[in-house]
Image: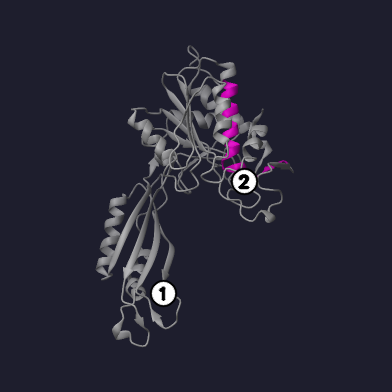
Amino acid sequence: MNVLELARALIRRPSVTPDDAGCLEFIGERLAALGFTLERLDAGGVANLWARRGDDGPLFVFAGHVDVVPPGPEDRWRFPPFSATVADGRLYGRGAADMKGSLAAMVCAVESFLAEHPSPRGSIGFLLTSDEEGPAVHGTRHVVEILQARGLRFDYALVGEPTSEHALGDTIKNGRRGSLTGRLTVHGKQGHVAYPHLVDNPVHRLSPALAELVATEWDRGNEHFPPTSLQVTDLHAGVGATNVVPGECRMTFNFRFSSEQTPEGLQERVDAMLRRHGVPFSLAWELGGRPFLTPQGELITALSDSIEAACGIRPRLSTSGGTSDGRFIAAICPQIVEFGPVNATIHQIDESVALAELEPLAAAYRGVLERLLPPAGDDDARV
């Protein structure tokens, strides 16, 4: 089964978060046939697979997720979203680009690599989950906590997120900004709009502070990260009547923050700003992940060289975009990168991946193994 066939088999399994729809068992069978030891670390209705082949270091880990976002209105799709239809040089289906194409390429890359090098130096691992697109509490985070408690560390990790922007291989992610969510409740006093002296409007209380929050320049970023940004994602007040002043106002906002900030520092600044404006509030915080960065080193060099050999393009490094499970893996791995197909259609109607990307993607993944885990006595291995 080549990359295309394996990708189609995975797409046909409707693994909407957190249901893995049998994907992990299917992949596990392929890995077991290669000599991998499999361990299911399911929790909270989430399916997780940790697989490893070899006991020695260095340990190289492929990481990813089998879950996909809901397809949306299926009648708007050109083809049924889980039919894995091939047309016009593309593979259509939910998860084709994010990230079942990458998973298929990873498995085929390892199969090809081990067929030629059955006794490579070091070990190969797979960390796969069915909860990356959802809350991401019982998925990769859970597995990492277990492995960390065992004292296990990875030397290298490659996450198969769709990072390419215009052509396969033009971009790899070597880090991500942190994510911090605030859930603010502004307290007031409900009453009739005709008696303003008897009410305390929480929307009015919040407005001056909100204006300052959204106008603040938190930092200017640095050579690795864009500036920290704040976005309001939800704002609600009122009981649905035009003659009632609300008793409270609720706002949810999110920071995507650079390494110039800390979660604690941002929380302190927001708290001080609200108090300075006299806002009566309560505020709950949720840390989605801290910034992480992989500096130029063995993994970036190996992946860049491999991409150039397989795709004919030298990738640029980027830390833009949303979060990924790399933020959890960073706790036990000093070198993490993300690389996958073009991301132009991810989470969209008619998500698809170009057929011409699949085999080169597998070749790039294999090339990393060739460079970092060459057979003993073959330290100068090249693809």
- x then y, percent, for residue 102: 57, 36
Kind of residue at disc 2: Arg
185 in relation to 86, above or below: below
273 relative position to 220: left or right: left
Counting residues from the start of the chain, the first of labels 1 and 2 encountered is 2
Residue at 69%, 55% in the rendered image = 75
Label 2: element kind: loop
> Residue 238: which disc?
1
- x then y, percent, for residue 51: 48, 27
- x then y, percent, for residue 127: 47, 33
Stretch of the chain drawn in magenta? 89-113
Label 1: element kind: loop
Residue picked out by circle 2: 94
156 in relation to 46, above or below: above
**Residue at the far front in the pictured view:** 45
Kind of residue at disc 1: Gly
Q: Is residue 294 visible?
A: no
Q: Main secondary structure of the magenta part?
A: helix
Q: Nearer the viewer, residue 289 or 273?
A: 289
Is residue 162 inside the magenta stretch?
no
> Residue 165: which disc?
none
Question: Dot 1, how many residues are within 10 Å of its Cα: few (below 14), some (14-19), or many (20+)?
Answer: some
Q: Tell us which disc is closer to us: 1 or 2.
A: 1
Q: Nearer the viewer, residue 213 or 236?
A: 236
What colour scheme governs how the chains and residues are painted in the rendered image of this protein? one colour
Is residue 91 inside the magenta stretch?
yes
Residue 314 placement: quadrant: top right
256 in relation to 241, above or below: above
Question: Dot 2, how many residues are within 10 Å of its Cα: few (below 14), some (14-19), or many (20+)?
Answer: many
